[in-house]
C-alpha cells in the first residue's frame, strides 16, 4: 500500500524534529539547553486552571457546538472588537483546537490548484506546507533584515497578480520577531483594495510586543474587515500550548465552510477548555503583563550577549520571543552551525532555512527559557566559536 501522492507535498515543523533529537541527547546524559521550541516556559495562570477544574466538576466533558460555545464566541468577539477597534460578533468566530486549523481550514475552503498565495519567508512553515498540499502556487516574499524583517513593498506589489487568492501576514512574526509597521499595513491595504483576494492575518503573538504601540491589524482599516481572517488563540498569550484552543474571526460567508471542515475532522473543541478560555479573556490580565515584561528583560540581555559572539549579528526583535540571528559571517552554513551547536555546545536551536529558503544564513533561538539558561547558552556558544573556522575548513 502506497501513501497518496499529495502526502509528498506536505511539510513538517522543524522545531518538533529538533526537539526530538535534543531530548534523545538529554536521555543519554547530555546537558541540553532548549532554545528550539516556541513555547512560553511560564505556567498557565492559576485562575485559568481553576476555571478548568470547575468546568470538569460541572461536567463540561461532552460534545459542544462545532463552532464553539456561544458564550466563548461572544467573549472573543468583545475582545477582538476592543483590541482591533472593529465591530464583530460571535457569528464571525470559529473556535478550533489550536491556531493551525485557522491556516488549514480557510486554505482548504478557498484555494484551487494554481491559485497563488503570497506569504512571508522566512515564515511559519505550515503556511508553505498547506499551500503546496492543496496544489496552489506558493509565492514567497522575503523579509528584509534592514527593514526590521518586514516586506519589501515594491516586491510585494510586483508579486500580486490576477491569480493571487490569498495574502498571509504575520505580525509579530515567527521566526524573526519582526513587526509590520502601521504605515506598511496601510500601504498593503491600498495594494489589495478592490482585488478579489483574502488576507490571512496571523496575530497569535499580538499581545507579546516591546514597542510603544501595539501591533496594528489590517482588519481595522476601512474595507478590510470583510476580506480578512484573523488568526489568534490562547497558547502564546496565556501559556496554554497544551490546551489546544485557538480561534479565527472571519466574514460570515466563510464561517459555514470552516464549520463543515471542523465537523468532518474534530467535531468540536474540548468543552472544558472553552470554559477556561472565557476566564482567560475576561479574568485578570496581570500574568500576561508580567510574562511580557520578563520576555523583554530576557530579550535585551540575550540579544546583547549574542552580539558579542564572533560572526553573529542579532537585530533586536520587536515582538514574539525569538531572536533571529544572522550567522553568515561565521563562514558556516546555518544548518551545519545549528547542528554543531546542539552537538558541541548543548544548545538546541533552529536553522533559519527551516522557515523557508530566505531564512538560510540565520539561526532562530527561542528566549522562552530562564535568563540563567539563556546566559549560559550564550556563554557555551561563545566558548565554541573559536573552532568554527577550523570546522568550516574541514567541511569545505
Image: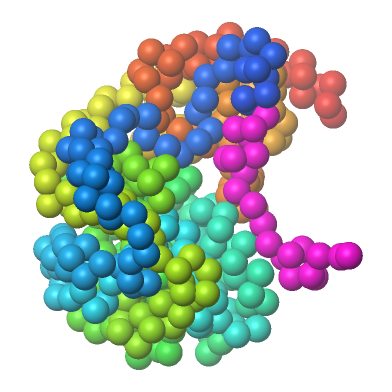
Q: Is residue 151 above or below residue 285?
A: below
Residue 343: name its quadrant. Answer: top right
Q: Does residue 331 appear to the left or right of 205 in the view shown?
A: right
Q: Residue at x 60, y 48 (%)?
A: 13
x and y, in percent, of residue 46 in the image: 21, 33
Q: Does residue 317 appear to the left or right of 77 in the view shown?
A: right
Residue 19 shown in magenta:
yes
Q: Residue at x 51, y 53 (%)?
A: 124
Looking at this view, name the residue that lies furthest to the right: 1
Q: Residue at x 35, y 60 (%)?
A: 62
x and y, in percent, of residue 92 in the image: 26, 77
Give whichever of 85, 211 is nearer the camera.
85
Quadrant placement of the N terminus: bottom right
Residue 158 shown in magenta:
no
x and y, in percent, of residue 210 in the image: 24, 40
Give whichever of 264, 28 is nearer the camera.
264
* Most frequent secondary structure within the magenta stretch: helix
Q: Does residue 9 appear to the left or right of 384 in the view shown?
A: right
Quadrant placement of the C terminus: top right
Q: Which span is picked out in magenta?
A: 1-21
Amino acid at each position: 500500500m502506497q501513501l497518496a501522492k499529495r502526502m509528498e507535498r506536505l511539510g513538517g515543523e522543524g522545531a518538533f524534529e529538533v526537539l526530538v533529537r535534543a531530548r534523545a541527547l538529554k536521555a543519554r546524559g547530555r546537558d541540553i539547553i532548549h532554545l528550539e521550541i516556541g513555547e512560553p516556559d511560564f505556567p498557565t495562570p492559576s485562575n485559568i486552571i481553576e476555571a478548568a477544574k470547575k468546568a470538569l466538576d460541572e461536567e463540561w466533558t461532552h460534545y459542544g457546538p462545532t463552532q464553539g460555545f456561544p458564550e466563548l464566541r461572544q467573549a472573543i468577539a468583545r475582545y477582538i472588537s476592543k483590541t482591533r477597534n472593529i465591530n464583530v460578533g460571535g457569528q464571525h468566530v470559529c473556535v478550533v483546537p489550536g491556531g493551525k486549523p485557522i491556516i488549514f481550514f480557510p486554505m482548504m475552503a478557498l484555494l484551487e490548484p494554481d491559485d497563488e498565495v503570497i506569504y512571508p519567508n522566512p515564515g511559519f512553515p505550515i503556511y508553505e506546507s498547506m499551500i503546496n498540499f492543496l496544489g496552489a502556487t506558493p509565492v514567497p516574499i522575503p523579509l528584509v533584515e534592514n527593514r526590521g524583517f518586514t516586506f519589501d513593498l515594491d516586491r510585494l506589489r510586483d508579486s500580486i497578480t490576477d491569480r493571487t487568492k490569498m495574502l498571509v501576514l504575520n505580525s509579530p512574526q515567527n521566526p524573526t520577531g519582526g513587526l509590520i509597521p502601521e504605515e506598511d499595513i496601510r500601504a498593503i491595504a491600498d495594494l489589495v483594495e478592490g482585488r478579489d483576494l483574502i488576507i490571512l492575518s496571523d496575530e497569535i503573538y499580538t499581545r507579546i510586543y516591546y514597542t510603544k504601540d501595539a501591533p496594528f491589524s489590517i482588519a481595522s482599516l476601512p474595507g478590510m474587515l470583510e476580506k480578512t481572517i484573523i488568526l489568534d488563540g490562547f497558547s502564546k498569550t496565556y501559556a496554554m500550548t497544551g490546551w489546544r484552543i485557538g480561534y479565527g474571526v472571519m466574514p460570515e460567508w466563510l464561517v459555514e465552510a470552516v464549520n463543515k471542515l471542523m465537523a468532518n475532522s474534530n467535531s468540536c473543541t474540548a468543552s472544558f477548555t472553552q470554559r477556561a478560555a472565557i476566564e482567560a479573556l475576561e479574568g485578570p490580565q496581570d500574568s500576561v503583563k508580567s510574562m511580557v515584561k520578563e520576555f523583554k528583560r530576557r530579550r535585551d540581555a540575550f540579544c546583547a550577549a549574542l552580539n558579542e559572539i564572533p560572526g553573529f549579528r542579532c537585530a533586536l526583535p520587536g515582538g514574539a520571543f525569538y531572536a533571529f540571528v544572522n550567522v553568515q559571517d561565521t563562514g558556516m552554513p546555518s544548518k551545519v552551525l545549528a547542528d554543531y551547536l546542539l552537538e558541541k555546545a548543548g544548545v538546541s536551536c533552529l536553522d533559519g532555512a527551516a522557515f523557508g529558503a530566505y531564512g538560510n544564513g540565520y539561526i532562530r533561538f527561542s528566549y522562552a527559557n530562564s535568563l540563567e539558561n539563556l546566559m549560559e547558552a550564550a556563554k557555551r556558544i561563545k566558548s565554541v566559536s573559536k573552532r568554527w573556522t577550523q570546522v568550516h575548513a574541514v567541511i569545505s
